[in-house]
Image: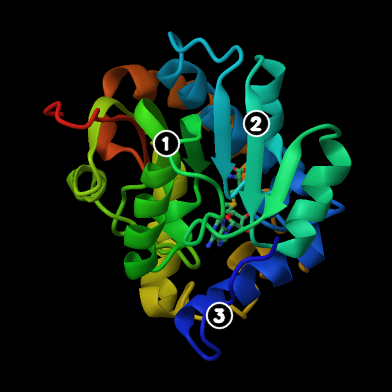
């Protein structure tokens, strides 16, 4: 099955090309980097991935995944599909990016992984108990986000849950991201009949944010992330020997700071928000 291509020349096409380029360059050799920070050292991506894992474990701590029908939207190289399957869920993963899916299939034998876009999910209505999308919807254009949420809600059974992790920091200068504040994400989901059950922040990373601020004020925010076909900052840094070395002590310090931020700071101050939402039953007020 294939994703219906967006109109030639549209911004959506540029984003699709971005993911194809990233996946071709990185997915086979660095499957985690391809879905986190392409070309960054593995110790840096593992730091961010551990923070995401803590958030996922916290958010789903009392959800029994055994035998649940789960749809992993934008499954990338398949890490969350495998994580859910290891907990007994019956997982279907979808992603429109050919090379991403090839890597996911090679490393996830037995999982049902299909080429499909979140904006055109070719699966039956109400066929999943839980739909998840980790750092996927944030990368869609705002108008595509609306369509994707409608599609994810359509395939979710009444009473089923949606778990999403997306950027809430509107000042972030990362490449090809379209963040919303927490209230903006919650309103988007509410328009499609989903009500919030649980929210948690993820990634406070104050030291990284100071660096990002300095970088963007030096170059001008528009110079970063505006062209999806251009190599990212990390891809450019990877060509300079030793360029990542100054980040090593920052990661070490952040490993101590981050759990403290998780406990002490408001979730709305984090870079990302995790949202667990429930689809209402027809005729029952959310
Ligand atoms: C940041 S990666 C996250 C991958 C995975 N969820 C994870 O956390 O490991 C974003 C993923 O979204 C996928 N993607 C891009 N456009 C998409 C779309 N229209 N529908 C679904 N997935 C899409 C990309 O191919 C990529 O695999």
Quadrant of residue 205 in the image?
top left
Q: Does residue 222 lie above or below 70 as drawn?
A: below
Label 2 – label 3 distance at C-alpha: 29 Å
Q: Give the residue pinned by disc 2.
A: 91
Asked which quadrant contains residue 140, the reply is: bottom left
Say whether residue 268 is left or right of residue 239.
left
Horizontal and vertical percent position of residue 167: 38, 49
> Which residue is tagged 1?
156
- Residue 253: horizontal and vertical position, in percent? 53, 29
Residue under label 3: 14
Q: Nearer the viewer, mark 1 or mark 3?
A: 1
Residue 205 seen in the current view: no
- Under circle 2, the secondary element is strand
Q: Earlier in the sequence, mark 2 or mark 3?
A: 3
Q: Quadrant of the N terminus?
A: bottom right
Q: Which residue is situated farthest in the left direction here?
A: 285
Mark 1 surroundings within 10 Å by alpha-carbon count, few (fewer than 14), some (14 through 19), many (20 or more): many
Pick whichever of labels 1 and 2 is earlier in the sequence: 2
The residue sitting at 51% across, 45% down in the picture is: 124
Pick whichever, 230 or 160, lies toward us. Answer: 160
* Mark 2 touches mark 3? (CB < 8 Å): no
Taking the image as drawn, is residue 130 in sight?
Answer: yes
Residue 210, given in percent of the width and then of the height, sits at 39, 51
């Amino acid at each position: 099955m294939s994703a219906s291509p967006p109109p030639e020349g549209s911004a959506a096409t540029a984003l699709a090309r971005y993911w194809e380029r990233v996946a071709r360059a990185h997915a086979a050799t660095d499957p985690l980097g391809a879905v986190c920070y392409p070309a960054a050292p593995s110790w840096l991506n593992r730091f961010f991935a551990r923070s995401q894992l803590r958030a996922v474990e916290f958010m789903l701590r009392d959800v029994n995944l055994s035998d649940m029908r789960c749809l992993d939207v934008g499954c990338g190289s398949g890490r969350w599909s495998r994580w859910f399957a290891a907990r007994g869920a019956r997982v279907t993963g979808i992603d429109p990016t050919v090379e991403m899916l090839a890597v996911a299939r090679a490393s996830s034998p037995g999982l049902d992984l299909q080429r499909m876009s979140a904006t055109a999910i070719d699966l039956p209505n109400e066929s999943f108990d839980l739909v998840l999308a980790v750092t996927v919807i944030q990368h869609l254009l705002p108008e595509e986000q609306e369509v994707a949420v409608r599609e994810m809600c359509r395939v979710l059974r009444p009473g089923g849950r949606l778990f999403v992790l997306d950027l809430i920091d509107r000042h972030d200068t990362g490449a090809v991201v379209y963040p919303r504040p927490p209230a903006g994400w919650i309103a988007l989901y509410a328009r499609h009949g989903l009500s919030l059950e649980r929210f948690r922040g993820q990634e406070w990373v104050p030291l990284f944010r100071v660096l990002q601020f300095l970088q963007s004020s030096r170059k001008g925010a528009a110079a970063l992330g505006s062209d999806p076909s251009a190599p990212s900052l990390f891809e450019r840094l990877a060509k300079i020997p030793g360029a990542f070395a100054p980040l090593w002590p920052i990661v070490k310090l952040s490993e101590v700071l981050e759990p403290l931020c998780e406990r002490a700071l408001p979730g709305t101050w984090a870079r990302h928000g995790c949202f667990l939402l429930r689809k209402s039953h027809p005729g029952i007020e959310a």
